[in-house]
Amino acid sequence: MSAPASPAPLCAAPASAPRHGPGHRWKVLATGVAANVSFAAAIGGIPTTAVLMRGSYRLGDGELGFCLGMMGLGIALSEVPWGLLTDRLGDRRVLMGGLAATALWLLLMAVSVVPAAGHVPTHALLAAGLLVLGLLGGSVNGSSGRAVMAWFREGERGLAMSIRQTAVPAGGGLGALALPPLAQAWGFAAVYGALALLCAVTAAFAWRWVHEPPAAQPASRPVHAAAPARGPLRDALVWRLVGGMGLMCAPQVAVLTFATVFLHDFGHIGVAAAGMTVAAVQAGAAVTRVWSGRWTDRHGNRRAYMRGCSLLTLFVFAAMAALTWLSAAAPGWRALVMPALMACLVLGGICASAWHGVAFTELATIAGAARAGTALGLGNTFAFTAFFVVPLAIPGTAAGFGWASVWLAASACALLARPLFPRA
């Protein structure tokens, strides 16, 4: 089918943009993946420098949790506004502008929010810097997701969105491998500078490749036709689904933000080995997200898959709580218990992350592509509320009740999420 003379006016593509055939959707998907990798390297990688950050910025555990939580708060506050703006202005403008602004902010942090000889930034300044980073970076999620949904047809979207969501653990794994050595060797200016470069390069990719699909392309028709008359903010099913997503993010965030501190302080494991453990979680999550998207596309069982992930997460984190309690109660057994505990930590982190692409596909399908930016923004608001609340809650919980209670609370969140995920 040949493309019409002009693209659909949902996105502000340049007047000179070439006509793009269906194969162009893979370039759009690649750009969405790159955009999410760039930002995920920050939100997933910076927490893996937590032990170094605690020393360099002279933070207590409570102050560390507060600063790390600010990134999640910034994303949670900005996701719905960014989603509404994406549905109004188009994914191209929001994705390019958000990435460019994020890169500029990271450069500013590399200059002014880093420890130097005789000067250590206050934890309030660090928290404010990470808050703004979250506010700006929140533009990436809804805009890239809306672009992918517009270019792929039903039967492909689960795989495409899961590949896009794979960028989150992939970027986090990249950050976990690269940022601690950078911080150790050259300080946090190198950390923020490297992240700024990633975002700037991806902004250029967005400028080059992200355009609206031709109006006659089959990939774009069914979603617009399926768009409900009422918006996603007034849809009870949407609110139920995003509530379950937010709860399921709690165990994931617990692993991503404080696993390195837990392994270092409780397990007496080095910073490099702890970072590798988190990188293993991210790598496993990336693989399972791609597999789950393809598998649920074939079987049409997205909702059943989400419920299965919540059940498995419940059991694995309960096992982690039991092993942690055993290790603390019987120190002589620690040499035997710690390898099993680390294996459960990796497995639990993967289970708590594998469902993302499937859930966001289901969420965007319910809303329809014309309002997908808003729906995806709402989903990310709930997801990143966990990134704010969980790092704040963990230090006090661990200090008052022990690390076993942290993993038990994560298991309880998965238990509460299960009934919120709709049945098939």
Image (spheres, grey):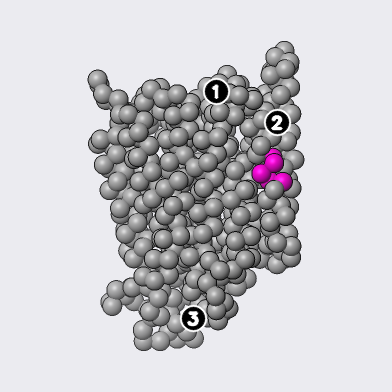
Per the image, the residue denoted by label 1 is: 264
Q: Which amino acid, by three-letter code, is at mark 2?
A: Ala
Q: Name the quarter where the C terminus is drawn.
A: bottom right
In the picture shown, does residue 365 fall above or below 60?
A: below
Per the image, the residue denoted by label 3 is: 217
Q: Disc 2 to disc 3, how far (Cα)? A: 51 Å
Q: Which amino acid, by three-letter code, is at mark 1?
A: His
What is the crowding at mark 2: few (fewer than 14 residues within 10 Å), some, or many (at least 20)?
many
The x and y percentages for residue 241 are 63, 59
In the picture shown, does residue 319 fall above or below 268?
A: below
Q: Disc 1 to disc 3, how far (Cα)? A: 53 Å
Q: Which amino acid, by three-letter code, is at mark 3?
A: Gln
Given this view, does label 2 or label 1 mark the residue nearer the observer?
Answer: 2
Q: Residue shown at 40%/57% (left/top)?
A: 139
In the rendered structure, does residue 243 fall within the stretch colored magenta? no
Task: Give the mark nearest the N terminus, 1 or 3.
Answer: 3
Please tell me the numbered disc located at residue 321: 2
Task: Give the mark nearest the N terminus, 2 or 1.
Answer: 1
The x and y percentages for residue 187 are 33, 28
In the picture shown, does residue 325 fall above or below 138?
A: above
Q: Secondary structure at mark 3?
A: loop
Q: Secondary structure at mark 1?
A: helix
In the rendered structure, does residue 412 fall within the stretch colored magenta? yes
**Of residues 332 and 136, the one drawn nearer to the viewer in this rendering:** 136
Q: Which residues are magenta?
A: 411-415
Q: Could you say which quadrant of the image residue 67 lies in?
A: top left
